[in-house]
Amino acid sequence: MDSTLAGFVRALRAAGAEASTAETIDAARAVALVGYADRSTLKASLAVALAKSQDEKQICDSVFELYFGQTTADAAKSLFKQDDQAGQAAGPRTGEAAVDRLLDLAEGEPAVLAAALARAGRAVAVDDIRFVSQTAYLTRQLLEAMGIAALEARLQRGAGAALAEASASAELPAMAMAQAMAAALAAARERLQQQARQFVDQRYALFGRPATEAFMTEVAVARPLGRLSPPDMDRMKAAVARMAKRLAARHSKRQRILLRGQLDFRRTMRANAGHDGVPFELHHKHKRRDKPRIVVVCDVSGSVMAHVRFLLLFLYALQGTVADLRSFAFSHALKDVARPLETLPFDDAMALILREVGGGATDYGQAWVDLHDQHWHCIDRRTTVLVLGDGRSNHTDPRLDLFAELSARAKRVVWLCPELPGRWGSGDSEMLRYRPFCSHVGHCATAGDIERAIDEALSAYG
């Protein structure tokens, strides 16, 4: 696989498209067939081979335009093709040879200059850019790799000396020639600087900006949910979507798993009785695996609002992945909120849930009563109940009897509490009384904590 395609796939992955090794091999085979001559055919072929969804198709198209620019496909290939002959031709030069070469590049075909910039960019590892603050430094490194120092030295010394000599001799043609030389050198330097900066900006857009966003997202994921800034909230939407997708990929397994090597002898003999016992058709033993069945109960009172938002965001992203997922929210009365999460954009669903359920004093006992009276049929031995709340019930009856019955009825009960364990049981907190009936109780501070809790809940069905 040539370096052109390898660089494109790397940029595609940095932009968020999950181009696998197998898909990259398919893309290489497609490029071998269609070549780089026709830009539109190349673009369509790469999208077919590397994109698995409409979103990835859009990513692939945008990265293609940015990566190959406005040059023809053949010229674009020449920008990145590495071979010994090109490396020797573009090798470092000094003195007048370097100046003459840079003048030729500045005044010549754009594709030739772009090829020289690409080769110099590889020499200084421009594609490893991560932050925008590196652009000025890498631009200078790029120019130095191309031999800009020789041009600048000639501009500062040679042209100045020629101009002084011409001025002393008062020869107007010589003076004009010296001025023209200085102007040509300055114009060449300016064009080279401009093109070098544009090249570095392009590589930052391809590789640096995604790396910066990934770094900032990692910071946001590790930050306590109650301390997220507005920019962090936008990043978290994308981060939570990726987490949910990762969980879905990890746990989307078949209900029936074939146990290789374990032949069901009786079924095989019965199935082949008509063949005089010759085992043309083999039957194996299977192990049944319960499908994930999750019931989520969220306290949406003001004290846990930030945490609930991200749990609901996880549930929103998991819609359609977990076959049996029920979502309930309460502050006083409990309400089924699965339909808004399934049918509305997340922000609209969140606003509706808060408007209909968010008001009123928190009453955990009433929530368990409503769950018992209206939705008890949703809970059985295959169900994992995931509770998110601080357990503060405003000194109302916590209905431990119903919660104990819930625990006995369900497969597991997992409780995520946003408060630190040191505060459990203080004031109106009922956490210490609920804890004995839970399979797991954990402190939930970050989005990563929510991901781990959902991961553990789904792992129970492995």
Image (spheres, rainbow, N blue to C red):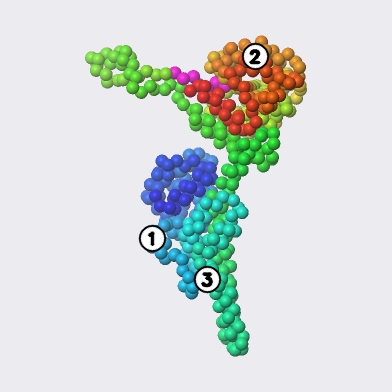
- Residue 269 is one of the magenta-drawn residues: no
Residue 232 in the image, given as x and y percentages of width and height? 65, 40
Q: Residue at x 58, y 58 (%)?
A: 137
The residue that label 2 is drawn on is: 403
Residue 84: mark: 1
- Residue 293 is one of the magenta-drawn residues: yes
Answer with the quarter of the image where residue 296 lies.
top right
Check disc 1 and give the amino acid type.
Asp
Relative side of 4 to 164, left or right: left
Q: Quick one: 79 or 125, which is closer to the camera?
A: 125
Residue 199: mark: none
Q: Quick one: 268 or 365, which is closer to the camera?
A: 365
Residue 55 in the image, given as x and y percentages of width and height? 54, 41
Marks 2/1: CA–CA distance: 73 Å
Q: Which residues are magenta?
A: 288-296
Q: Nearer the viewer, mark 2 or mark 3?
A: 3
The residue that label 3 is drawn on is: 150
Q: Does residue 65 appear in the picture of this structure?
A: no
Cβ atoms under marks 2 and 1 closer than 8 Å: no
Cβ atoms under marks 1 and 3 closer than 8 Å: no
Check disc 2 and give the amino acid type.
Phe
Q: Nearer the viewer, mark 1 or mark 3?
A: 3
